[in-house]
Image: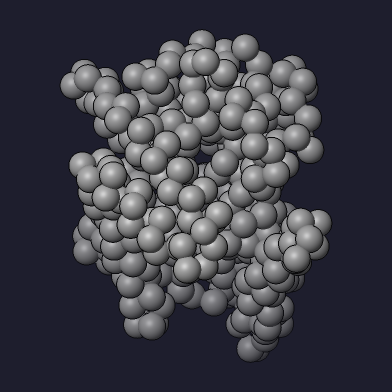
Amino acid sequence: MKEGASRALKLILGLGISGLLIWLTLRGDVPCGPDQVAATGGDCRVSKIAQLVSSLGNANYLALIPYFGFLVVIHFCRTIRWGILLEPIGKPTFQRLNSASAIGFMALVTMPFRLGEFARPLLIAEKGRIRRSAAMASVVVERVIDGIAMAIVLIVALLCSKPATTDQKSLALVRASGWIVFAFFFALLVFCVVAYVKREWAVRLTERVFSPVSAKLARRLAGMLDAFIGGLKMVPDGKKIALFVALTVVYWGLNGVGMMMLARAGFGLPLELIAAFTVLGVLVAGVMIPAGPAMLGTFHWAIIVGMSLFFPEPAQYGKVVAYAWVVWGAQFSQQVLFGLYFLVRGHVAFGSLWRTSTGDDEDEEGPRAAA
C-alpha cells in the first residue's frame, strides 16, 4: 500500500473510532432534572445533547483561569523531568528542551493514532550530540514509569474510594483497565531490563523472529533495538533520580487536584480528591486507545466513564459530559497554543514533523527545535 493511501486509511480509521465514541456518549435521552420535572408538572425526558448544551451554558468558566495555571506548571514539570533523562547523553539548553517539548506535546494531541509520540525525540535529536534512538529511549522510559505509576494510582484509588454507581459492569471494566495497563507497562519494563542486561541476545532474538517475514525488516528492527538499548544506558545519578520522582509526583498530583478543582468550581460536581485520581487513571488508560486527531472521543469517553462511577444519576449526565469537553478543550488549547508559539518561532514545518513522525524521514538529526 502506498504511503499516501496508508496515511489516509489511518486517518479514516482514527476518525471512525473517535466518531463512534462521541456518538456513544451523546446518543439517546435521560430523565429530566428536578427543576424541569417541577416546571412540566410530571415526568419528562431530555436528549443528552440538549442536556450537554444546557450544562455548558451554566458552567462557571472563571474556574478555567486557575486550571490553566495548573496546566502551565504541569508543562514545565514534564519538560524539566524529560531533561533529567536526557542529561547523561547530552545537555540541551532549556530553550531547546522547552521548544521540543511544547511542539511535541502539540503533535501528540493533534496527530492520529498517537503518532505525535515520535515528535519530541525527533525534535531534540542533535547531530553529534543527541541521537534520535537515545532520545526515543528517554521517551519510552518516561512512558513506562508514567504508565506503571498511573496504573497503581488507579488500582489504589478504586480500593480507597466509594463509587456511587450500582453498575457493576462499568466498575469491573475500570478495575480491569487498571490491571491491564499495569500488566502492559510492567511487561515493557521487564523487557527493557532484560534487553539492557542481555543486549546481544535481545538483538539476535529480534532478528531471528522477524527474518521469516522479511530479512531486510529483521535487520532494520534489530538495528533499531540495538540503538534503543544503547539509549537506555542513560541512568542519572541518585539526586537526579530523586528529582525525577518528585517531579513525577508533582506532575500527576497537579493533574488530579486541577481536575477536582475544575469539577467543583466549574460545574458544581462535588468530586473528591481520591475520586479525581480515579478519573485521571481511567483517562490515562482510555487515551491509550488509538483514535483520530486530538484524542477526540477517547478522551471524552474515558472521563465520562470515570466520572459516572461517582455521579451515576441521569440528571447529572449533562454536567459530566460538559466537564469532559471542557477539560479536553482546556488541555488541547494549552498544548496547541504553546506548540504553535514555538513552531513559528523555531521555523519547524509541521509537514516535516509529520513526515518524520510517520517514519518517512530517515535523517538521524530530525527537524530541529529552536536552539
Taking the image as shown, residue 198 lies to the left or right of residue 221, namely left
**Residue at (18, 21) in percent of width and height:** 238
359 versus 303 height, above or below: above
Can residue 157 be seen from the camera position used here?
no
Q: Looking at the image, how many numbered discs can be counted on the residues? A: 0
Which quarter of the rendering shows the N terminus?
bottom right
Question: x and y percent of residue 269 in the render?
Answer: 48, 56
Taking the image as shown, residue 179 lies to the left or right of residue 94, namely left
Q: Quadrant of residue 341?
A: top right
24 versus 204 height, above or below: below
Q: Quadrant of residue 216?
A: bottom right
Taking the image as shown, residue 205 lies to the left or right of residue 15, namely left
Q: Quadrant of residue 362?
A: top right
**Residue at (62, 57) in percent of width and height:** 113
290 versus 246 height, above or below: below
**Residue at (39, 41) in percent of width and height:** 226
Pick the residue in front: 350 or 154. 350
Pick the residue in front: 144 or 149. 144
Can residue 364 be seen from the camera position used here?
yes
Pick the residue in front: 232 or 310. 232
Question: x and y percent of residue 289 in the render?
Answer: 53, 63
Question: x and y percent of residue 126 in the render?
Answer: 56, 19
**Residue at (66, 47) in percent of width and height:** 358
Question: x and y percent of residue 99 in the render?
Answer: 61, 21
